[in-house]
Amino acid sequence: MVTKAQFKKDYLKKLTVKSGRTIEEASRWDQYHALASMVREYASMDWVDTNNRYDDKACKQVFYFSIEFLTGKFLMNNLINLGLDETASEVLDELGLDLEDIASIEKDQGLGNGGLGRLAACFMDSMAALAIPGHGCGIRYNYGLFEQKIINGYQVEFPDRWLNNRNVWEVKKADKSVEVHFYGDVKLENGRYFLENTTPVLAVPYDTPVVGYKNDTVNTLRLWSAQAINKEFDYSTFSRGEYMDAFKKKYDVESISQVLYPNDSYDEGKVLRLKQEYFFVSAGIQGIIRSFKKLGKPMAKLYDYISIHINDTHPSMAIPELMRILMDEEGFGWDESWSIVEKTCSYTNHTILSEALEKWPVEMFSKLLPRIYMIIEEINKRFCLDLFEVYHKTQEEVNRMAVIGHGEIRMAHLAIIGSHSINGVARLHTEILKNKELKDFYNIMPAKFNNKTNGITHRRWLINSNPELSKVITKYIGDYWIRDPQHLRELMKFIDDKDFRQEIDDVKRKNKEALAAYILKHNNIVVNPDSIFDVHAKRLHEYKRQTLNILHIMYLYNRLLKNPDEDFVPRTFIFAAKAAPSYYIAKQTIKLINTVADLVNNDTRIKDKIKVVFLENYSVSLAEILMPAADVSEQISTTTKEASGTGNMKFMMNGAVTIATLDGANVEIHEQVGEDNIVLFGLTEEEVYELYERHEYKTDHIIENDPRIKEVLDQLINGFLGVDKEEFQIIYDSVVYNDEYFVLKDFDSYAAAQERIGHYYTDEDIWLKMAITNIAHSGVFSSDKTIQEYASGIWETDRVPK
Ligand code: 26V
């Protein structure tokens, strides 16, 4: 362990070397840069050791393939995991600097849209904490998810230049680059296929250390960047005087890792996206095979040493790519290759939304990836044959289940048949996969299906983001919960302890004040820390029903206008959400929230009883401020639509009470905390399916019979909101004429649930009991537990501690 004196000496030296300035002259960036570089170097010793340890022991290693890793900032987490946070804080203090201040300058690594990418980041943290040999494989996007600004109430997107000031954490490994080949002609020679006339792209890996919690283990997150091969530009074209064309090739090639697609619910079928997917999958697998060969173990037993995890369908080309390498490069036959691939690969499904299920047009795919397409065709042919001959399926069933159909390749089907394990991300979601969405597959291969409920890392989402709460917890139950968060349960022993309750209350109050200050600074809105902080933070999607929330706020506003003296528990409704740039109705929902906010916040008649705040640019860092300050966590998706949710777990761990439908992991949260400590409402799974199946649901009856609903709907289109009458027509039409997410159907039940929240909140005893019960039962949602289950149930990997 580094001593304080050593740390100080190292820091001062690093600052001088890196910035060429004295401590007095150094800018905030210089101070950050020196500190971060130093922390990375500290981690590097263990990094090398860890890799050697894994190789020496020839232990099984996991490669988690994901098109997104939403890691956020690294500095504080790495300091905590290295056990150096206090040392750093004290040393900087002595130097007249502030650690928190310095840490805040780091740019978020925002290489993901939402839940799936953040889950990948939590999993990386947990694998390292448990000393499970597990590494990430993804894309080093030059631009992460767009930066959101709210201008005149509308979302406007700006590029996220996260790499502008260089990335201290990564190490370029140019010598580990590989070539990825696109297009070309498939040739056969001596019984082996190969490609000619391809367009090659150089894949250059950048490695980031993933530091385990005080365990000398450092795993690797490897992100690939696309580079043109060999030449800066095409010299012959350049010589002919076609200057711009000379660079075109280079730009085309490098566009592959230029930008993260900002869409997470609608499969656009763009060729660039397909290129991205094959690019990182092929590079990753080539890298794995190359280092595997150095171990000197038999390729036929690859699955004893390597596990490849496919995070959603985006990396599912891992299956045909591994087939290609085994057959075309290693000389295995089809059957043996297939058996190796199936034993090596596993797949997680994250969504049942049909529009999000990836399908690639055969024409586009076969041109871009001719050999991979050939292999998929063969996989499909053999699978369909099996369906007929082994499983006696009808033609109709075979058509439904085939990998190729209607001119498209169905990536989920490919992932299912090429993997030995398929898991859902919450119990309800897994049951829906088995009994509805993937029923055909479950019927013939039930043993492959399993549930692994998502989790979150308490190191980022509690220890780092809510240090005050962590301190109180440790004061009462000791610090063993940090190793095993299930021990948070012991907090229940203190649920009636007055002092403990007071301390919990004080922490929440302080966090709410901090958020209030943030809101004042960024939105210029004064909010009351005594009001209920009701937070709805997640991607903007119709199924997540921000619309239900804002319509309900409009109703509360109307109620107060009619009766300003009503005994009303003051509420601050806080939203944070990015909408996909092409998702018009989602963007209009943001405009609606901001429009309502302007109206409500400036109406003195309601005496500040409601405030509405939309915080721009929702990101990991913003979430770290929001979660600790929330009283109420909005988890109000249309039942069956949210596969799991992970924000729900983060809020709960920070003592918020959930208002929820019985969807995704909310079901399991309910089970943990019990009926009294969660506020449920809305349609059940059965009711939702019945409504969908009967095709009879209409909203006119609801609107006629509920004046609250009628009034707010009218206000959307009658000018009441002070904008063009047409502005929110699309939202009006969607809930009135095509309410596929049952916003109006659930309105009454949601309003009643909100009413209950108000009652509970006014009784401090009840509320604190609810909050504490939530914290105490959040340990089962630790991603350490989830990862342990993946390790034993799917990957069959052991811990390899030092
Ligand atoms: C999906 C798609 C599908 C269409 C093509 C573009 C694209 C890009 C990204 C994604 C990923 C979105 C899926 C996602 O984030 N799902 C969320 O996964 C969480 C972790 O399992 C889970 O908690 C959320 O319920 C689920 O919505």
Image (cartoon, rainbow, N blue to C red):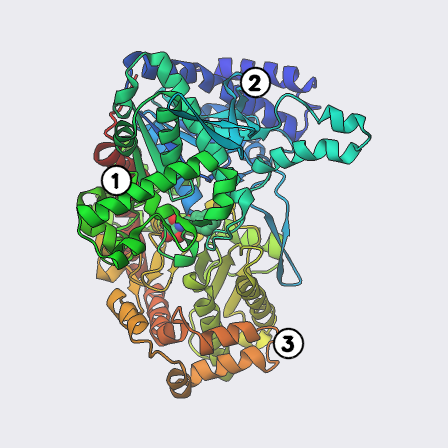
Identify which residue is drawn at 28% across, 32% down: 338
Label 3 near label 2: C-beta < 8 Å?
no
Label 1 near label 2: C-beta < 8 Å?
no
Q: Which residue, as the protein is rendered here, is positioned at the far right? A: 241
Which mark sits nearer the N-terminus, 2 or 3?
A: 2
Labels 2, 3: front one: 3
What residue is disc 2 on? 11
On screen, residue 78 versus residue 745, left or right, reads right
For the question of whether residue 3 can be seen, the reply is no
Mark 3: secondary structure: loop
Q: Which mark is residue 421?
A: 1
Identify which residue is drawn at 34% across, 57% down: 657
Q: Residues within 10 Å of mark 2 (few under 14, many from 20)?
A: many
Where is residue 276 drawn, in percent x and y? 51, 38
Depth check: give the residue in front, 682 or 565. Answer: 682
Depth check: give the residue in front, 656 or 135. Answer: 135
Label 1 near label 3: C-beta < 8 Å?
no
What residue is disc 3 on? 722
Which mark sits nearer the N-terminus, 2 or 1?
A: 2
On screen, residue 624 versus residue 723, left or right, reads left
Alpha-carbon span between mark 2 and mark 1? 47 Å
Where is residue 301 drawn, in percent x and y? 25, 21
